[in-house]
Amino acid sequence: MASEKPLVAITCTAPTNIAVIKYWGKRDEKLILPINSSLSVTLHQNQLKTTTTAAISRDFKEDRIWLNGKEEDVGHPRLQSCLREIRRLARKRRSGSDGDSVPLSYKVHIASVNDFPTAAGLASSAAGYACLVYTLAQLYGVESELSEVARQGSGSACRSMLGGFVQWHMGERPDGKDSIAQQVAPESHWPELRVLVLVVSAERKPVASTAGMQTSVETSPLLKFRAESVVPGRMAEMVRCIKERDFEGFGQLTMKDSNQFHATCLDTFPPICYLSDTSRQIIGLVHCFNAHYGKTKVAYTFDAGPNAVIFTLEDTVAEFVAVIKQIFPPEMNGDKFLKGLAVEPAELSEELKSALAVEPSPGGIRYVIATQVGPGPQVLEDPQQQLLGPNGLPKLAS
């Protein structure tokens, strides 16, 4: 009879985040150090999350990883950076002997799944690396500054280590020790804030972020100006808007920063165009809607892809979802068009309909995910939710 458990496993979830002051461009590729600070909103894990199980056993012959059921190369440099760093921190913490600790010589098996489609272009690497680092830290009993470790997997992952509203300080040190994430306000701070993710029809994948960023850093004078002269003031202003729950200020700055980010992509040579015709229609629609009311009631932001993320307040969600359905009539999947938080149907006034002088585009938006601001990574206590079976291999999907 074995005196020790053959397998020690832990399962956690982590959120994705949407930047309202954008990160684009690195000053150090290996350590993933940015040329400017950024600020994001953590989205709720009830709608969008990554789940990761990490297990160690003396029976495992090598480190292995499965993403969404498919085995991937565990030798990926960024993955190795995170694994190496967590094990280093675990060793450092154990300079004494600790009977409860899991042996560091044992190999680890990791399984990770996203519950949102990769097509949604929703910072899956941010949620993925945040979840990986948080889960490994729980497994090895590491309690240090984890955002610095997650950053080495994917820059924006450092912001997914915290809930609510999060700033990533660019830092100044060459070793990156001060390039870390910090919470500006917790998820409970602005309960009325709502987020709508508009997933547009899948178009050909544009330039990958890592390659796009590098080209921008090398060729765009506008990006350099943005990082040095624009972002510092915008960071301070965005923190103020969030602390004061000033939606008009928050919304306008979010849109301006998204537009400037995409302007730097066009200023890159050759130019990078992440927005599609549908993206531009959504931008026009938001400005039309706000002009009709004479104030900023909805705001858009776009990352490196055509999908829109809309910020609004609870009292405007139903009406704006009705506007989306009016301008982008769902094709066939009416019942599956709206996912996430429940949204009551709303009637549009004739004045608003005539103000939205936009030609309808049936099927332009595939579906909408309604969500809100949420907490950081969580540990799942229920062993049924583990992704790895007792043999350390992924459980077969039931």
Image: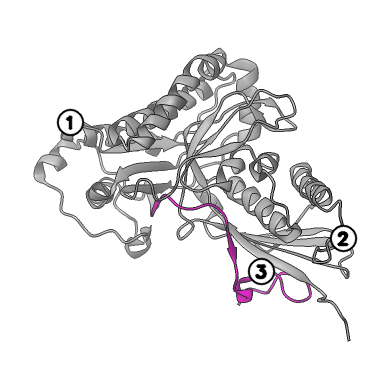
Residue hosting label 2: 62
**Crowd band around label 1 with a 10 angstrom C-alpha radius: few (<14), some (14–19), many (20+):** few
Report the span colored magenta: 369-398
Q: In this view, does 155 lie to the left or right of 289?
A: right
- The answer to if 185 sits in the magenta stretch is no
Kindly identify which numbered label has been placed on residue 371.
none
Q: Which residue is drawn at 36% across and 32% down?
A: 241
Q: In this view, does 317 lie to the left or right of 306?
A: left
In this rendering, the answer to whether 109 lies above or below 391 is above
Residue 369 seen in render: no
> In front here: 153 or 380?
380
How many marks do you count on the picture? 3
Residue hosting label 3: 387
Residue hosting label 1: 294
Disc 1 residue type?
Answer: Gly
Q: Earlier in the sequence, mark 2 or mark 1?
A: 2
Residue 119 in the image: x percent, y percent? 53, 50
